[in-house]
Image: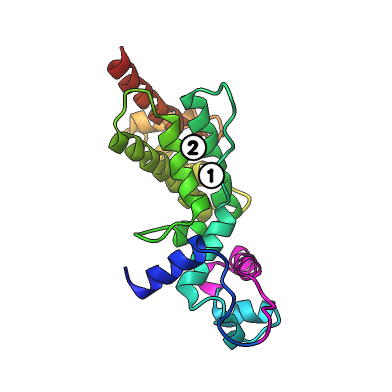
C-alpha cells in the first residue's frame, strides 16, 4: 500500500492517535471531518481545502496537519462521517425489504451530501461505517442460494442504480426533477416529430409527472434477484 493509503487506514481504522508533538490536542478527527463536510455541503467538494477547514475551525493550517496529513485523508474522513451507517437490521424483514430500505437510505445520503458522488469513486480505503453498507447487502442475501461474488455484485448493482439516479438529480434544478426536466426538453421535439417517433410520443404523452425512476429500477433489480434466488432454491 502507498503512503496515502496507509495513512487513510490509520485514521479510519486505527485507535485515535495524539499528535506527536506540541501541546495537548485541541482538535479531534471528528471536528475536522465535520468542518470539511460543512464546507462540501455548502460549496462542493472542490471548495474543500486544508486551509479552508483550518479557518472554519479557527486554527492554522499547520496545526491541522498534526492530525490529518493531507486532503486525500481529509476526504476519507469526511466520507465516513457523512455516509454514516446503513439502515439498522429489523427482525422479520425479508431480504427484499432490507435491500429496499438500504437503497432508499443511500439515495437520501446522496441527496443530503451530493459531493459524496465525487468522493466515492475509484479504488480507495473505506472506513468501518461505509464498509458496513456492503456488509449489509451481502448479509441480507446470505442463505438464498447466491455465491459470495454474486452477493457482492448485487451490492454493486444496487449502488450503481442509486448513484445513477442521484447524478441525474444533482444535475437538475433545485426545484425540478430529472424526469420532469428531460420531458420539458424532449416533449416539444417529440411531439413535433411524432410521425418519426410514434412509440416515444405515446410514452411521453402518458407520463403522469411522477419521478419514479429510482423505484422502478430498484424493483426491476430486485425482481431479477428474486428470479435467480427462486431458480437456485427451487
Q: What kind of element bears circle 1?
A: helix
At x 59%, y 48%, the residue is: 176
Q: Which residue is mark 1?
A: 107
Q: Is residue 46 visible?
A: yes
Q: What kind of element bears circle 2?
A: helix
The secondary structure that most of the magenta stretch takes on is helix
CB within 8 Å, label 2 to label 1: yes
Residue 33 position in % (x across, y down):
60, 67
Q: Is residue 46 left or right of residue 112?
A: left
Q: Quadrant of the N terminus?
A: bottom left
Q: From the viewer's perspective, is residue 51 above or below residue 192?
A: below
At x 42%, y 47%, the residue is: 164
Label 1 packing within 10 angstroms: few (<14), some (14-19), many (20+): many
Q: From the viewer's perspective, is residue 121 above or below residue 168?
A: below
Q: Quadrant of residue 227?
A: top left
Q: Is residue 196 left or right of residue 9?
A: left
At x 49%, y 48%, the residue is: 166
Q: Is residue 196 visible?
A: no
Residue 146 position in % (x across, y down):
31, 28
Q: Which residue is mark 2?
A: 214
Q: Earlier in the sequence, mark 2 or mark 1?
A: 1
Q: Quadrant of residue 41?
A: bottom right
Residue 39 position in % (x across, y down):
62, 69
Q: As rendered, which of 87 and 182 lies closer to the eye?
A: 87
Q: As rendered, which of 50 and 39 lies closer to the eye?
A: 50
- For the record, the magenta segment spans 23-47
Residue 135 position in % (x across, y down):
44, 41
The Cα atoms of the two marked residues, 2 and 1, are separated by 9 Å
Amino acid at each position: 500500500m502507498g503512503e496515502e493509503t496507509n495513512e487513510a487506514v490509520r485514521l479510519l481504522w486505527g485507535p485515535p492517535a495524539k499528535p506527536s508533538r506540541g501541546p495537548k490536542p485541541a482538535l479531534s478527527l471528528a471536528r475536522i471531518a465535520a468542518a470539511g463536510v460543512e464546507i462540501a455541503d455548502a460549496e462542493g467538494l472542490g471548495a474543500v481545502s486544508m486551509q479552508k477547514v483550518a479557518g472554519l475551525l479557527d486554527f492554522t493550517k499547520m496545526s491541522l496537519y498534526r492530525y490529518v496529513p493531507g486532503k486525500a485523508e481529509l476526504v476519507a474522513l469526511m466520507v465516513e462521517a457523512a455516509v454514516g451507517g446503513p439502515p439498522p437490521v429489523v427482525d422479520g424483514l425479508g431480504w427484499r425489504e432490507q435491500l429496499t430500505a438500504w437503497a432508499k437510505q443511500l439515495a437520501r445520503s446522496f441527496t443530503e451530501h451530493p459531493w459524496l458522488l465525487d468522493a466515492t469513486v475509484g479504488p480507495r480505503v473505506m472506513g468501518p461505517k461505509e464498509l458496513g453498507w456492503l456488509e449489509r447487502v451481502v448479509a441480507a442475501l446470505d442463505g438464498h442460494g447466491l455465491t459470495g461474488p454474486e452477493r457482492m455484485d448485487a451490492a454493486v448493482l444496487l449502488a450503481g442504480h442509486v448513484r445513477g439516479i442521484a447524478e441525474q438529480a444533482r444535475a437538475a434544478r433545485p426545484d425540478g426533477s430529472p424526469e420532469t426536466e428531460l420531458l420539458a426538453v424532449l416533449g416539444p421535439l417529440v411531439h413535433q416529430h411524432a410521425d418519426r417517433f410514434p412509440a416515444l410520443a405515446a410514452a411521453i404523452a402518458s407520463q403522469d409527472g411522477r419521478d419514479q425512476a429510482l423505484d422502478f429500477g430498484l424493483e426491476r433489480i430486485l425482481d431479477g434477484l428474486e428470479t435467480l434466488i427462486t431458480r437456485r432454491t427451487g
